[in-house]
Amino acid sequence: MARRSLPPRCGRKAVRSNAANRAYRAKRAEYFAAGTVVVWDVDPVACTIASYRAEHFDTPTVFNLEQIADAEPALPGWRVPVRDIFG
């Protein structure tokens, strides 16, 4: 039986520079075109998570250290304090 490749429901990427961020914008478009529902861009310098959803692919929800991030609708009910991500 042939194995079918499915897109991830949720993806994440650590972004470290503006040049990488521009390049990753195109990668997000590829993910969404393949069926990915949510993509996180994790900024380890600013300690933020930008959550992009397929229906609003250019307008992220940005979570900071004082917030609790989610990956709705890809991971219903899943929540994590941003502070726990950055330790």
Image (spheres, rainbow, N blue to C red):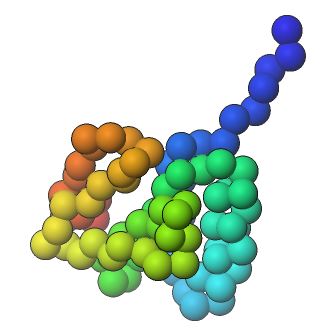
Residue lying furthest top in this view? 1
Q: Is residue 5 above or below residue 84?
A: above
Q: Which is more toward the observer, 71 or 80?
A: 71
Q: Which is more toward the observer, 87 or 37?
A: 37
Image quadrant containing the C terminus: bottom left
| Residue 74 point in image, percent of width and height | 44, 45
Please indicate, yes or no, whether residue 14 appears anywhere in the rendered image.
Answer: no
Image quadrant containing the N terminus: top right
Q: Is residue 20 above or below residue 55?
A: below
| Residue 15 point in image, percent of width and height | 52, 75
Q: Is residue 81 above or below residue 66?
A: above
Residue drawn 30% across and 55% down?
70
Q: Is residue 23 above or below residue 29?
A: below
Q: Which is more toward the observer, 84 or 37?
A: 37
Residue drawn 47% across and 79% down?
59
Whether residue 57 sits left or right of residue 70 in the image: it is right
